[in-house]
Amino acid sequence: KNGMDSTEIVERFVEAPKHNRMISALAQGNSVFAPTVRLVKTWINHQMFSRQIPEELIELLVASIFMGKQSPNTVPSAF
């Protein structure tokens, strides 16, 4: 197969940019979001799960914590 199918096109050109905008907005609105994402990605990498867990999923999981009623205000309190 030489080209992308419709699912790959939607993922690359519709869903990925939406995800990127949402994560960027959250990072701009909360100064500890990006360091927390980096910490979680590092931890997952050290546990050797980085091949099984996509980066986008990690970002969404951390985002779900930050979008809750009591958003953390420091990196350690995110856990």
Image (cartoon, rainbow, N blue to C red):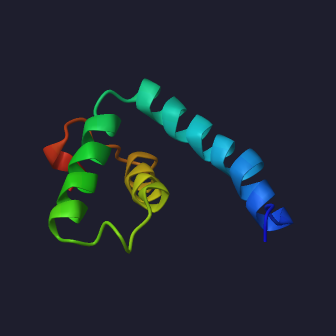
Q: Which residue lies furthest to the front in this view?
A: 2
Residue 68 horizontal/vertical position (percent): 43, 51
Q: In this view, does 76 lie above or below 27?
A: below
Closer to the camera in the image, 14 or 31: 14
In this picture, residue 77 sits left or right of residue 17: left
Q: Which residue lies furthest to the right in this view?
A: 6
Residue 79 horizontal/vertical position (percent): 20, 56
In this picture, residue 44 sits left or right of residue 27: left
Taking the spot 32% from the left edge, 27% from the top edge, the residue there is 31
Q: In this view, does 34 lie above or below 1?
A: above
Taking the spot 46% from the left edge, 61% from the top edge, the residue there is 57
Q: Using the rendered view, name the quadrant where residue 49 is placed.
A: bottom left
In this picture, residue 64 sits left or right of residue 36: right
Closer to the camera in the image, 75 or 11: 11
Q: Using the rendered view, name the quadrant where residue 45 is placed.
A: bottom left
Q: Is residue 37 above or below residue 79?
A: above
Taking the spot 79% from the left edge, 64% from the top edge, the residue there is 2
Q: Give the position of the N terminus as an image quadrant.
A: bottom right
In this picture, residue 30 sits left or right of residue 43: right
Taking the spot 57% from the left edge, 40% from the top edge, the residue there is 20
Residue 40 horizontal/vertical position (percent): 25, 54
